[in-house]
Image (spheres, rainbow, N blue to C red):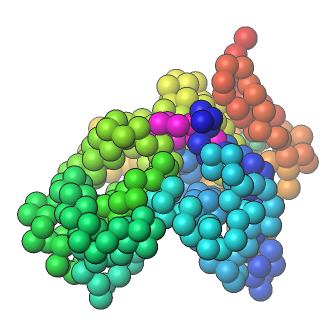
């Protein structure tokens, strides 16, 4: 078994719209190791969610389509599989926790049936076996009186408990890789902390790999081993969490770190922000896509796009003038 579980290579997912061809995922490459938790961060609209949907084979078509690259899970390129095999790989080897449980769960189906059905279909369990296993899983994700709650519908659970049900569905087939797309955004901070603890526990217990998508660098600091920063459909920096927080190389990463609220700022509600707006994907800037917002931009930045390259140590950065260069 290889140490790399997921390898994404030069992935390109385009949206074919009336405004033209948009490129929310524009040549994205990264890997997730076995047992590793990797963060994918950036502002809304930078391509994080579309990257996750591409890996899961859930890109809405139309208007979206994967037009290039490879997504290898344990060495097997998912983009070469037929729909049926891909569905099985997706359900058995990967689990996705979405932003909003109320849209991801089926409102007309009891939660016990939603968990059991997945296991019956993909693991060949009998109805009785699946029901038993569903109780164990609900219990494991911290739902009190799990056996009684199997018969409840999603609307009978609180927001935090619905997220736990969705985690139960994502892990019921014991997948190797969990993809979590901002699963705590809509929850209050106490429930957020409980869910982060739950994912950490699952990771420790069974050595799962996790790809955690978020705009919140605080979550990254708490959960992740390594982090990729995305901007305008591309990875612009990759580093260990420690390196990224100590020595950000890309000006955009430095801006994201600067906009993390300190305790004082939380009290005063005066947050720093990165100047300007992310680019409109229908009218991308020339050269480095960050140049209109970057205080270090030079003529070269306006004319030529930098590639993601090693910048000392294990870090990668796509910038002509990185803020930190290892000597
Ligand atoms: Fe700024 Fe230039 Fe680096 Fe882009 S390439 S982030 S514009 S310094």
* Corner quadrant of residue 59: bottom right
Task: Indicate the quadrant of ligand 1 in the picture.
Answer: top right
**Residue 200, x across and y down, in percent:** 33, 41
In this view of the protein, which residue sits in the foreground, 21 or 283? 21
Q: Quadrant of the C terminus?
A: top right
191 left or right of 261 in image: left
The number of discs equals 0
58 left or right of 323 in image: left
| Residue at position x 23%, y 71% in the image | 128
Image: 195 above or below 54 = above
Q: Quadrant of the N terminus?
A: top right
**Residue 253, x across and y down, in percent:** 59, 39
Bounds of the magenta span? 31-38
* Corner quadrant of residue 223: top left
205 left or right of 234 in image: left
In this view of the protein, which residue sits in the foreground, 327 or 131? 131
**Residue 45, x across and y down, in percent:** 60, 63
From the image, give the main secondary structure of the stretch colored magenta: strand
Is residue 200 something that shows in the picture? no
36 magenta-colored: yes
* Corner quadrant of residue 277: bottom right
**Residue 248, x across and y down, in percent:** 60, 30
Is residue 48 something that shows in the picture? yes
Residue at the extreme top:
327
| Residue at position x 43%, y 73% in the image | 121
| Residue at position x 48%, y 32% in the image | 225
């Amino acid at each position: 078994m290889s140490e790399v579980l997921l390898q994404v290579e030069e992935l390109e997912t385009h949206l074919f719209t009336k405004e033209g061809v948009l490129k929310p995922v524009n040549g994205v490459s990264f890997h997730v190791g076995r047992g590793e938790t990797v963060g994918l961060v950036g502002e809304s609209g930078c391509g994080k969610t579309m990257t996750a949907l591409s890996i899961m084979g859930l890109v809405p078509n139309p208007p979206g389509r994967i037009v290039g690259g490879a997504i290898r899970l344990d060495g097997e390129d998912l983009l070469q599989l037929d729909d049926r095999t891909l569905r099985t790989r997706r359900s058995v080897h990967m689990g996705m926790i979405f932003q909003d449980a109320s849209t991801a769960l089926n409102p007309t189906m009891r939660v016990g049936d939603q968990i059991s059905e997945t296991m019956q279909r993909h693991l060949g369990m009998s109805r009785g076996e699946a029901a038993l296993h569903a109780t164990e899983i609900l219990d494991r994700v911290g739902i009190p009186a799990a056996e009684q709650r199997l018969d409840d519908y999603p609307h009978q659970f609180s927001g935090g408990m619905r997220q736990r049900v969705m985690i139960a569905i994502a892990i019921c087939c014991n997948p190797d890789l969990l993809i979590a797309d901002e699963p705590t955004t809509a929850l209050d901070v106490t429930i957020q902390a409980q869910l982060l603890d739950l994912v950490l526990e699952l990771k420790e217990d069974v050595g799962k790999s996790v790809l955690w998508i978020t705009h919140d660098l605080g979550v990254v600091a708490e959960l992740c081993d390594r982090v990729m920063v995305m901007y305008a459909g591309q990875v612009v920096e990759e580093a260990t969490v420690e390196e990224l927080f100590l020595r950000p190389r890309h000006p955009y990463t430095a801006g994201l770190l600067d906009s993390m609220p300190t305790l004082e700022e939380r009290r005063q509600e005066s947050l720093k922000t990165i100047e300007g707006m992310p680019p409109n994907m229908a009218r991308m800037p020339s050269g480095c896509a960050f140049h209109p917002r970057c205080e270090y931009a030079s003529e070269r930045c306006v004319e030529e796009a930098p590639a993601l390259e090693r910048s000392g140590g294990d870090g990668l950065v796509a910038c002509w003038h990185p803020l930190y260069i290892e000597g």
